[in-house]
Every structure is written in C-alpha cells, then in structure tokens.
Image: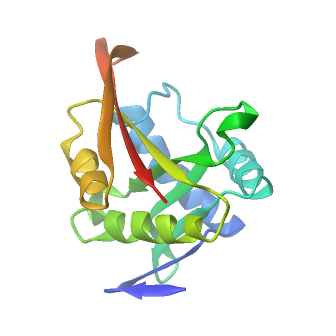
Amino acid sequence: MNTRRDFVIRPTRAMDIEQVTGIYALEVATGRASFEIEPPGVEEMTSRYEKLLEAGYSHLVACRGDTVLGYAYTSSYRPRVAYRFTVENSVYVRRDARGSGIATALLTALIEDCRNKPFRQMIAVIGDSANAASIALHRKLGFREVGVLKDVGYKFDEWLDTVLMQRPL
C-alpha cells in the first residue's frame, strides 16, 4: 500500500466497485474519454473487475478514507495470444478530485505493479485527441505518442479520434 499526499493507492476491493461504477458512469454519460454510450451498472462492472483479476491484470483505487477518488487498471491490449505481454491501461478520477495528483499516483502505481508481472509494453488508447490532460499525464510518465486513429468513434453527434501512446515496462 502506497500513501501519497492525503490519499492511499491500494488494490481495488469488491466493496469499491459501486463507487468505481459511479465514477465511470459519469464519464460515459458526459465525457469523451470512453467510447461506451450507455453506462454499465454495478453488476456489469463487478463482472469486468473479476475477469481482470482472474486474468492476472491489475486494478487499483485511490482512496481517502472509504471514499474512492479514482481508479486505474490494466487489461488485454488485444485478444490474440501473441499480444499477451502487452497491456492497455485505463485511469479515471472523480471530477471533484482532479488536479490533486491522483491520476499521476494511480498510473505510476499501475506501471510499478506491471513491472512485477510478465508484461513488457503498456498501451494507452486515449479517447478524443482533445483530451490534453490524459495525453500530458501519459507523456509525463514516459509514454510516447505512436499514432492517431482519425474519426474512429462517434459519440455526442461528433466523430472522435483515438490517440495511441506506448511505454516499455
């Protein structure tokens, strides 16, 4: 368990998933970082969390007391077996907790956790090329931009890009 400022980064527990679901639901409903259209419920998010853990991926939360401020996880980059040493990362922070170093702490902890596993590369698939905060976060932590997929997502009546960033582990 790592303490940073006034919050703690730790592995996600089943009891955290309701708050994780709330953070993600707001992003799906109003943001462009996720290309999902309908926010998944607690049951679906619990299923996703359990499958990630069963597959050996990381899932972390940043907490202040019992309050989840943000979360980060790794997942399969692509399903074919040749990609098994490459992971994709995701980081989400509550809107009222942004700007306090939580995303940096979560992604740093996620990278460190992955170094203790057989993974060699981490990929960030950033929804919306205008997502300057996420691009800057990843750049700060050693990711480099490797491409932009133009107009691959359609959400809120507009076409959105995806920025691909990569970092060796």
Q: Position of residue 65 (x, y in %)?
A: 48, 84
| Occupied quadrant, residue 81 | top right
Q: Is residue 33 above or below residue 154?
A: below
Residue 54 appears left or right of 110: right
Rendered residue at 24%/71% (across/down): 100
Compared across the picture, whether 85 is left or right of 51 comes to: left
The vertical placement of 89 against 5, above or below, is: above
Residue sitting at 19 percent across and 43 percent down?
132
Residue 32's quadrant in the figure? top left
| Total number of numbered discs in the rendering | 0
Residue 151: % across, % down: 32, 13
Q: Nearer the viewer, residue 57 or 169?
A: 169
Instruction: Specify whether 168 is left or right of 56.
Output: left
The quadrant in which the N terminus is found is bottom right
Its colouring scheme is: rainbow
In front of the other: 167 or 124: 167
User: Where in the figure is residue 67, as x and y percent of width and height?
Assistant: 47, 73
Q: Residue at x 52, y 50 (%)?
A: 121
In which image quadrant can residue 128 be found?
Answer: top left
Q: Position of residue 156 (x, y in %)?
A: 32, 18
